[in-house]
Amino acid sequence: MAITGTQNPVSGETTCGSLLQQLQLIWDEVGQSEEERDKMLLQLEQECLDVYKRKVDQASSSRDVLLQSLADAKTELAGLLSALGEMSNVNTPEKSSGTIKEQLAAIAPALEQLGEQKEERIKEFADVQSQIQKICGEIAGNLKIGELVGTPTVDEDDLSLKKLDEYQTQLQELQKEKSDRLHKVLDLVSKIHDLCAVLGMDFYSTITEVHPSLDDSVGVQSKSISNDTLSKLARTVVALEEDKKMRLQKLQQLAAQLSDLWNLMDTPMEERSLFNHVTCNMSATVDEVTVPGALALDLIEQAEVEVERLDQLKFSKMKEIALKKQSELEEIYAHAHIAIDSVAAQEKIMALIDSGNVEPSELIADMDSHILKAKEEALSRKEILEKVERWMSACEEESWLEDYNRDENRYSSSRGAHLNLKRAEKARILVNKIPALVDTLVAKTRTWEEDRGLSFMYDGVPLLAMLDEYVVLRHEREEEKRRLRDQKRFHEQLNTEQETLFGSRPSPNRPTGPKKVVGPRANAGASNGAASRRLSLNTNQSGSNGARSTSKDGKRGDTRPVAPANFVAIAKEDAVSFVSSNDPVPASP
């Protein structure tokens, strides 16, 4: 077998042909046989085939790698496009044309761009998911202060904007819920702060018992917003509000007790002002009490100590207080002209206090009740008493007018005579109104007695009995005036006849004047005006001298009724008086 080869004379390079020629020359010199030469040439040819085969195999393997790379690139491109869900933002090759390397070169930029977008999208997903996990942990209460959230696992198969928007929507909802919870937490913390201030409690220890993050040193965004924290805060607010309500009730009770004790013992305002911080909330509602320390425990204890001190002091001053209340009651009765046994009442009060069988506060309350009833009774008697005052005043003027009419020098030109004359004119007008006033007073008194089923007593005397006796005495006085007028007329006729027969002679003694009806104020010198307002009649003279009325047979008889036994008698003057010129002259019987 001959191997042909050529030598390149231009380049001078060694080729297979030149090498073969050299080998033949060597063989010729050696004298190599043809068989050996053929064998060696066959070996050389086999070795060349092996080299070519290896090269073909290598080229084929390289092509397969490139094809696999191209397939992987296409798969990766399809996966990225599917995961990102985007087609318009990346330039991808539309046709599979050209060599394998050309196709790989065409896909490479798209892969690189999509890979970068994937990394950015993964970061966005991780950030949103991390925030979601953090807020969920805060709401659930699983996240401690300063604790970091682990890196979330991102689903790389779905990195689309739609999925990202879903996560962002969820995040916004959670952020809103967090904001709402944070506002609730801050509101509850603010309420607790205000309540602790009013109650005088330590806000820091109270709030940190709920959760350490609620302290002012912790930032707002780091405060716990868990369901457990909100529940504890709400329970704390309810407990503090209940405590505030109970303390306010206790303080108001103490303030009321202080006020009662102060009023009971007439405590000066200077001493009362020391507890203005207690009494200022006596009628306040729970929501109105906002002053820091207004319901502190030490303040309540201070008020309790003061109430206890005043209670002890009240026992020592009980007699003085009770006597003061009794004096107030007696003064009301005195102004209302209601007779009571003051001595017996005071002795009863002293005996009750000394026995210790009655609570002082109950005794004072009972006396206050009596005082209230006495005021109500005095108010019901007011209208009648005012008319009694007018009646008594008219009777006094009537008495003065009778004394004035008996004065022979009343028309003289002495100093003050004109004033007495004016008073007499007014007195006559007032006296003429007495009958109508008495009738009105009797009617109102009877109406009062019918409404209450009681007798209207005036300083222990029935007012109707006083009025009835006054009417009787006034009638007797009118009768006596009539008798005196007739007697005067008779003496004047007798004197005229004697002067005609015997000449002028001295006038006889002045006849006895009519008896004066003593007014209700005849004993005006009594103390407190109580006894001085009582109608008084002279029962002695009415029994001994009678009305001095003369019958037709010349005998005298007692025409007046006897006054009640409980009347206070006052002496009457049987002075002679001339009949006033304004009084009507009755006809002779």
Image (spheres, helix red, strand yellow):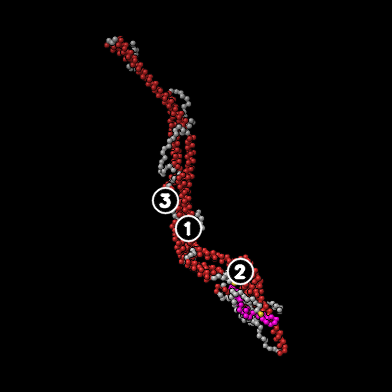
Which span of residues is magenta-colored? 533-556
Question: Is 116 positioned to the left or the right of 508 in the image?
Answer: left
The first of marks 2 and 1 along the sequence is 1
Residue depicted at x 57% and y 65%: 376
In which quarter of the view is residue 474 placed?
Answer: bottom right
Residue marked by disc 1: 251
Instruction: Provide the residue designation for mark 2.
Output: 455
Q: Is residue 185 depicted above or below 25 in this figure?
A: below
* Within-10-Å neighbours for mark 1: few <14, some 14–19, many 20+: many
Structural crowding at the residue carrying mark 3, measured as other residues with C-alpha within 10 Å and reported as few (<14), some (14–19) or many (≥20): few
Q: Residue furthest bottom?
A: 502
| Residue type pointed to by label 2 | Ser
Q: Position of residue 164 (x, y in %)?
A: 47, 36
Q: Which mark is residue 205?
A: 3
Residue 521 appears in view: no
**Tags 1 and 3 touching, CB below 8 Å:** no
> Which tag is nearer the camera, tag 1 or tag 3?
1
| Quarter of the figure with the C terminus | bottom right
**Which numbered disc, 1 or 3, marks the residue that appears first in the sequence?**
3
Give how far across and how far down residue 483 sits, in percent.
68, 80
Work out whether residue 572 or residue 565 is closer to the camera in this orientation and state it: 565
| Residue 450 occupies quadrant | bottom right
Q: Nearer the viewer, residue 587 or 93?
A: 587
- Residue 512: % across, % down: 65, 82
Task: Tell me if residue 342 comes above or below residue 2 in the rendering.
Answer: below
